[in-house]
Amino acid sequence: MEINQIIAHNVKFYRLKAGLNISQLAEAAGISKSMLSQIEGGTTNPTINTIWKICAGLNIPYTLLLEDSDLNKPTIIQKSKILQQHSADGHYRIFNYFPQSVHRRFELFQMELDPHSQYKSVGHSSNSEEYVMVIAGTLWITVNNQKNLLKKDDTIFFNPTNPHIYSNETNVIAKAVIINNYY
């Protein structure tokens, strides 16, 4: 199944589960009703930030909207078979290895950020913590207007509710593991 169809199915499922109509969810998520209708209809592939906004409006983890039933079955997960998402400019990519589920209260991603690029996250769930470990290159993460330098094998954790920025100011790709822990 294509990613926009998975997202369409899951947005409608969780919207109905929350007892919301399209207008109520659009208002809670801070997006237009027409955009939400297109997403639920599977006619558009929403941006990463739009998905975060919908998740905030539904008060659910990000990966619940991306979860296809087949992702929960494999023991070995190959990167080549994972749903990849990217920013509008294509310089920021995330790979969802472990979506949050009834068995897990966390999401695990691998993130890649191209040289001389940045990605601005709109912020997400107030009931979570974000953990980041750099596995290749160098990454700057700005949280609450504080710029933090992380080199290979360095980690940081923070409250991801507010907007935060990932920056790569070097000539090599930066890679990191990101865990969103929900409580």
Image (tube, grey):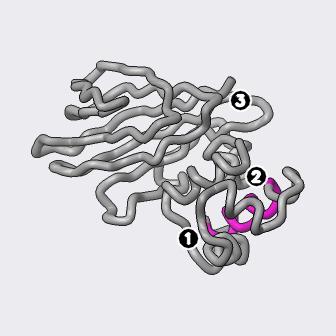
Part of the protein shown in magenta: 4-14
Residue 107: % across, % down: 59, 35
Q: Which amino acid does label 3 sit on?
A: Arg
Look at the numbered discs 2 and 3 and tell me whether their residues touch, using CB distance below 8 Å: no
**Residue in the foreground of this view, choosing between 47 and 105:** 47
98 up-or-down from 4: above or below: above
Q: Which of marks 2 and 3 is in front?
A: 3
Residue 135: % across, % down: 31, 29
* SS assignment at label 1: loop
Q: What residue type is labelled 1?
A: Asn
Q: Which of marks 1 and 3 is in front?
A: 1
Q: Which amino acid does label 2 sit on?
A: Ser
Task: Identify residue for label 1.
Answer: 45
Mark 1: few, some, or many residues within 10 Å (few <14, many ≥20)?
some
- Residue occupying image coordinates x 49% and y 56%: 48
- Residue occupying image coordinates x 61% and y 37%: 125
**Residue 18 appearing in the image:** yes
Task: Identify residue for label 3.
Answer: 104
120 sits left or right of 94 in the view: left
Point out the tag, 1 or 3, that comes first from the N-terminus.
Answer: 1
Please say whether residue 54 is one of the residues in the magenta stretch: no
Mark 2: few, some, or many residues within 10 Å (few <14, many ≥20)?
few
Residue 16: % across, % down: 87, 59
* SS assignment at label 2: helix
* SS assignment at label 3: loop
Instruction: Measure the alpha-carbon separation of dots 2 and 3.
Output: 14 Å
Instruction: Measure the alpha-carbon separation of dots 1 and 2.
Output: 19 Å
Task: Identify residue for label 2.
Answer: 69
**Residue 42 appearing in the image:** no
